[in-house]
Amino acid sequence: MTVLREGNLQITINNAIEARKFDDDASHGLSHCMKAVDFVVELSDHYLFIELKDPQDPQVPTERASQYYQEFKNGQLDENLKYKYRDSFLYEWAAGRANKPIDYLVLIALDVLDGSLLLTRQEGLERKLPLLGPGKRPWLRPIVRGCGVFNIDSWNRRYPEYPVSRLTP
C-alpha cells in the first residue's frame, strides 16, 4: 500500500509499482525551468500523473479559497495545469519512463465545485494538453491517454481504489 500526502490531503494507492513525489527539488531538480505535477505513480499498465490543490486546507486563508474558486471557475488555472502536465511528460519521456499510457488526474479539494463545473474544466484541460492531434486525429504516440478534474467526492466515486481523505477535517 502506498500513501501519498500533500498538505492536508492523503491518497492511498494499493497497486502501485512505484509512486514518487515529483514536484520537489530532490526528485525533479529542474524547478527553475520546468513545472511538475505533485506525484508520478506507476501502475502495471499505465502511469498516473496526479496534481492536488487544496484551497480549503485549514492553513490557507479563507479569502484565498474564494480567489482560487474564481480562478478555477473562469479557467485561469488551466494554463498552469497544462504546463505542469506537459513539463512532467517531457521530463519522464526524456528519462525513458513514459513508456505506458498516462492519465492526468487533478484534484481540486473545494466542496463547492459541482459536476458541471468540473466537467467544463476537464474539457478545457483536454483541449490544452491536447488529447488529440491535428485535425482531431489520434496521435501516433499519445501525449496523454486521458485527464480528469475532480473534487474529493467525485474522485472517491470515480476511483474507490485510490481513496482521498483529509488528514484533519
Image (spheres, rainbow, N blue to C red):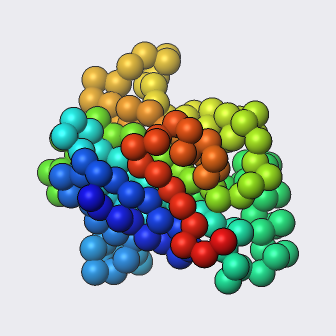
Residue 29 versus residue 110 in the image, above or below = below
Image coordinates for residue 97, horizontal then vertical, percent? 18, 50
- The image quadrant of residue 103 is top left
Q: Quadrant of the N terminus?
A: bottom left
Residue 119 versus residue 87 in the image, above or below = above
Position of 47 with respect to 32 (left or right) is: left
Residue situated in front as seen by the camera: 59 or 133: 59
Residue situated in front as seen by the camera: 166 or 19: 166
Image coordinates for residue 148, horizontal then vertical, percent? 53, 39
Image coordinates for residue 53, horizontal then vertical, percent? 59, 63
Position of 11 with respect to 55 (left or right) is: left
Q: Residue furthest left?
A: 96
> Residue at point 67% right, 34% down?
119
Position of 61 with respect to 49 (left or right) is: right
> Residue at point 77% right, 81% down?
61
> Residue at point 54% right, 61% down?
165
Q: How many marks?
A: 0
> Residue at point 57% right, 53% down?
107
Q: Quadrant of the C terminus?
A: bottom right
Position of 85 with respect to 118 (left or right) is: left
Image coordinates for residue 22, horizontal then vertical, percent? 34, 67
**Visible residue check, residue 70:** yes
- The image quadrant of residue 95 is bottom left
Residue situated in front as seen by the camera: 42 or 127: 42
**Visible residue check, residue 124:** no
